[in-house]
Amino acid sequence: MKIRLAILEDDRSYLNRITTVFNTKYMDKLEIYSFTSEQGIYHTLAASRIDVLLASDAFEIDIQKVPPRCGFAYLVYSADIESVRGEPALCKFQKAELIYKQILNIFAEKTVAITGSNQEGGARVILFTGAAGGVGCTSVAVGCAMYFAGKGKRAVYLNLETIGNADSFFRGEGQGNFSDIIYAVKSRKANLSLKLESLVKQDTSGAFFFSAPNTALDMLELKPEEIRQIIAELRSSCGYDYVILDISMQFGREMSAFFQNCSSVVFISDGSVTANDKTARMLRAMEILEEQGDGRRMYDMGILYNRFSSRTSGKMKDTGIREIGGIKRFEECSPRQLGVKISEQDVFRGLE
């Protein structure tokens, strides 16, 4: 499906440049209608069922004549301008990719199509978690996303921790954050697939990610079924090869059911006596839950040792799950540097 985009711009040079770029880069995504005057614009909006109208702030658009189904924003010269005449504003002088994402965002707000599909196939979903705190689950999950991106795969990292912050590891251009996605799911007022596409950012490593929500309290608003809905959309509708999940272990039947939607679940331990003991107890409890259920495990399960030291760490015995490998301790690294170093390890080959 193509988005029908109308652009009303008095600067003919800019109009020619932007339409040329869009027709080159997004010819399969956008159907563009361009105008240099308001004459006939309102008739076209209705007759051609325009999805999004972008108009230079040199024009004063009669909002009452814009069809309710059509998204709208003014084109402005400065990124500091958020609204004009009470309507949203979009900076015209930025990368075409960023403008395109904002167009998607505007369109998503006008199209209600949250499917929450859980189709077979699609991206592989790999979840990283741990029974003990401080073992480096987040850095390993980030490194995994960077690893697959380095292999030319489309990998998206999704931090589902209450106080997690992907921005500590990744850098990318774009607007909005995970709070906007939470609102879209809760309100059911936007197309979730398009909302995800418009808000995702791409790190220089090639990995995709979402910026942290405005406040950690926003994450508490998400229900388990809504989290599964977001993951299902990323898996089936967004063109990714891998969805990398980073989540704090909250043991129970709900978490066990959550695992069933994953391709692989990777437990992280640092090999310490405490972490290994907690992991062993958790694995045993999971076995009991599975026995009480239908007894089936639909996902691959493994253990990965992080910050492993031959002097202070040891491996678990008789876990009943496969050992994926180990990652040594890296000293004096920033979060981003740590993610990059971990991504260079061969340990993730077993998850391909």
Image (cartoon, helix red, strand yellow):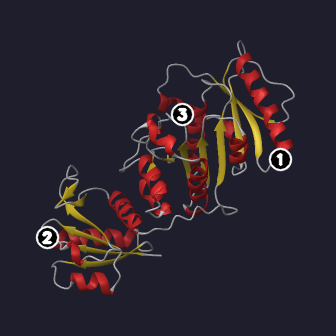
Q: Callout 2: helix, strand or loop?
A: loop
Crowding around mark 1 (Cα neighbors within 10 Å: few <14, some 14 to 19, many 20+) is: few
Q: Callout 3: helix, strand or loop?
A: helix
Say what amino acid the circle numbered 2 marks: Glu
Whether residue 272 can be seen here: no
Query: What is the CA distance from the residue labelled 2 to the residue labelled 1?
Result: 62 Å
Say what amino acid the circle numbered 1 marks: Gly
Crowding around mark 3 (Cα neighbors within 10 Å: few <14, some 14 to 19, many 20+) is: many
Mark sitting on residue 60: 2
Mark sitting on residue 120: none
Residue denoted by label 1 = 293
Mark 2–mark 1 CB contact (< 8 Å): no
* Res 94 quadrant in image: bottom left
Q: Earlier in the sequence, mark 2 or mark 1?
A: 2
Whether residue 2 can be seen here: yes
Left of 154 or right of it: where is 218?
A: left
Residue denoted by label 3 = 339
Crowding around mark 2 (Cα neighbors within 10 Å: few <14, some 14 to 19, many 20+) is: few
Mark 2–mark 3 CB contact (< 8 Å): no
Say what amino acid the circle numbered 3 marks: Gly
Spot occupied by residue 317 in the image (x, y as percentages of width and height): 85, 25
Query: What is the CA distance from the residue labelled 3 to the residue labelled 1?
Result: 37 Å
Q: Residue at x 77, y 45 (%)?
A: 300
Spot occupied by residue 146 in the image (x, y as percentages of width and height): 55, 42
Left of 290 or right of it: where is 273?
A: left
Spot occupied by residue 152 in the image (x, y as percentages of width and height): 57, 52
